[in-house]
Image: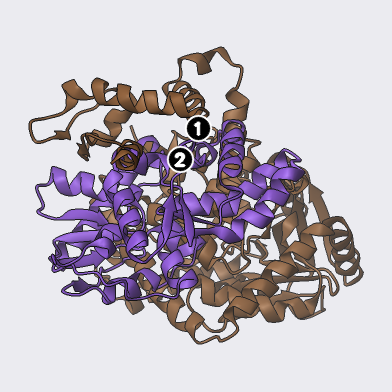
Chain colours: A brown, B purple
Amino acid sequence: MSLITIDPRKAAPFPEAAAEILHDTQLRKNVAHATDVIQRKRAIVVAEKDDWQALRDAGAAIRREALQHLDTYLEQFEQQFTRAGGHVHWALDAEEAQRIVLALLREAQATEIIKIKSMTSAEIDLNRSLAANGIRAYETDLAELILQLGAELPSHLIAPALHKNRQQVRELFAREMHLPNLTDDPPALAEAARLYLREKFLKVKTGVCGANFLVADTGSVCIVESEGNGRMCLTLPDTLIAIAGIEKVIPRFSDLEVLFQSLPRSATGERMNPYTSLWSGVTPGDGPRNLHVVLLDNGRSEILADAKSRQTLQCIRCGACQNTCPVYRQTGGHAYGAVYGGPIGAILTPQLFHLDYAQSLPYASSLCGACYEVCPVKINIPEVLVYLRSKVVDRQRGKLASVFNQERVGMKMMARIFLSRERFETAQSIARVLEKPLVGRDGWIHWLPGLAGRWTAARDMEALPAQTFREWWQGRGKQ
Amino acid sequence: MRISLFITCYNDTLFPATGKAVVSLLERLGHEVVFPLEQTCCGQMHFNTGYRREAYPLAKRFISIFKDAELVCIPSSSCVAMIRDYYRVLADENSDHTMTSDLDTLLPRIFEFTELLTDHFRLEDVGAYFPHRVTYHASCHGLRSLHLGDKPLRLLKNVRGIDLIELQDADRCCGFGGTFALKNAEVSTAMLGDKVRSILSTRAEVCTACDNSCLMHIQGMLHRQYAGVRTAHIAEILAAEADR
């Protein structure tokens, strides 16, 4: 049975899911290729900017300021957006957000909706809850369409079908769209999707989207995308519902100047975002007549309350951390068992679930720091990862099970050893005796028991040297 | 200069040759090396795995041993990163103002081994001779926390007889990550596989780095594969001399 899910409450621990995925040769080739391509493009357009580091600082400052005064800016956004003819709804959790959206759709007498790619709608599992209530959702983002047609799960923030290649997409489209002669030429695939979607755009009168930014001073909802399908979703329907995390607010319209430079460069390696839509209220004869924003908390307030991990909410969902991550490169997004995968997912997901679930995710990193280096809003992901690890460990302290946990026992013992020179030196001597039966004729260890056996599953270990450094040092002094 | 060596717990136990090389080179450069025998571990493994309560006394212990040192040399960039990046976090979390003020004065005197040579002593040619084909792996903490950049490479380029060959994706993690290699052994192995492939494609005899932790990981697979490539800490290359 496959271990793959995006519900952290049901997901297998990261190492188990990863171990399964690592055998998927096609997925690994696709993920490595796609992330290489995006990274190369990003590197070029970032290198062009002499002020790239200043842009990162400015982006971080904007996001920090927004979070520091989130209550004020959210209320300002609500006030401005409402004044311009929009409606704001507050949802404490996924269930409440689902109820609000459902009620709005019933009011609009909608039985079908068109959707622009939205992480929040995936976070609240909107499509499934709508289907259960007889409302059909059509994904219109090309990658989301691929996933929906193939009943697959997203694996990346920006390119959710990044784990699939065009041959696989051709096969899927040919089958689902009844196009037996379709080729895997990208323009042909895009044309097939265009024809399939155009019908929905013209027919369906209700749209659901997410939001990249909520601008407080102008009350604007900002959505960026690169296909134009989103533009259709945003302009053609009579009713448009945007589901946005409460952290998406930015103080000023002028802040977009910074983020519009750093986001597309980080996300897709583009200098400028192709389709940028800003709704600042309702205009008769132009765009949706009913404009709604659902502000989703769903655990975010708790993250905001923790000064040590608050920076998680600075994220602008560019996916650059995923593209650069050497762990994500091997596994893709599915191993993370959540809507948000990769390094940002490894810190966001456990916090969204109050660390009751996804406790393996903070450990799904070698702490190499590549994510922090590329982050356009300077989230120190490794720092948050190790902080969350300490919370995971602290939760287990004092519990009976921890007495039998090899790692915990080992860590406690090592800490005691390191606290005293004598104990440390004794341990060094004992280790040399204990390893003896394990050392092969070549002077190397090829097998170790217990937890350490995970090392020797793929790696040898040189036997301890005859003399420690300190022994050599002390002997040297006597000469 | 009188340089205090913090060898680190794993170098002390597993890689004494690196320590000997550091001592030999620093003495060759005319410095005095001292080795406080009380030293053990900086607490990195505990901190990074989530055991902050256990890491805190180890950090205190390190500071008490080294706070009066003129200069501290550490041949392990991940341990330097622990001390520079996270000791303040431990001090803050424990409202330990003494620790904070100790760090204020101690941190500027702490150097990773290659940093000490290039930044403090302004040296790029240390008079080494190492007639082998070598490739350099840029360990993550050295690269992204210490921002070593090309400093280690500049030192290597000045080694006589060396055939230094660039490693493809040299800045990509080898998959060690401390306890990551055990807790996520499968992904770690996949990452290491990529690293080993890059190393083998250089046809180097020796893979070097500023961290024996990465090298232990890399060497583990090279040895398992009978690859005919060995690893050596950069200090061992820089300390090597032609027979006189």
Question: Which chain hosts label 2?
Answer: A
Q: Is residue B143 left or right of residue B51?
A: left
Front-lying residue, A462 or A31: A462
Residue A400 image position (x, y, % from top left): 55, 12
- Report which quarter residue A161 is drawn in: bottom left
Quick one: quadrant of the C terminus of chain A? Answer: top left
Question: In the image, what residue occupies the spot 61% across and 41% down?
Answer: B64
Task: Give the secondary structure at mark 1.
Answer: loop
Task: Give the secondary structure at mark 2.
Answer: loop
Which residue is label 1 attached to? Answer: A10
Disc 2: CA contacts within 10 A as few (<14), some (14-19) or many (>=20): many
Q: Earlier in the sequence, mark 1 or mark 2?
A: 2
**Looking at the image, is B90 positioned above or below residue A85?**
above
Q: What residue type is labelled 2?
A: Thr
**Looking at the image, is B53 positioned above or below residue A282?**
above
- Report which quarter residue A62 is drawn in: bottom right
Residue A205 image position (x, y, % from top left): 66, 65
Mark sitting on residue A5: 2
Front-lying residue, B222 or A268: B222
Disc 1: CA contacts within 10 A as few (<14), some (14-19) or many (>=20): some
Q: Are marks 1 and 2 in contact (CB under 8 Å)?
A: yes
Q: Distance between the residues labelled 1 and 2?
A: 7 Å
Q: How many labels does the image show?
A: 2
- Report which quarter residue B150 is drawn in: bottom left
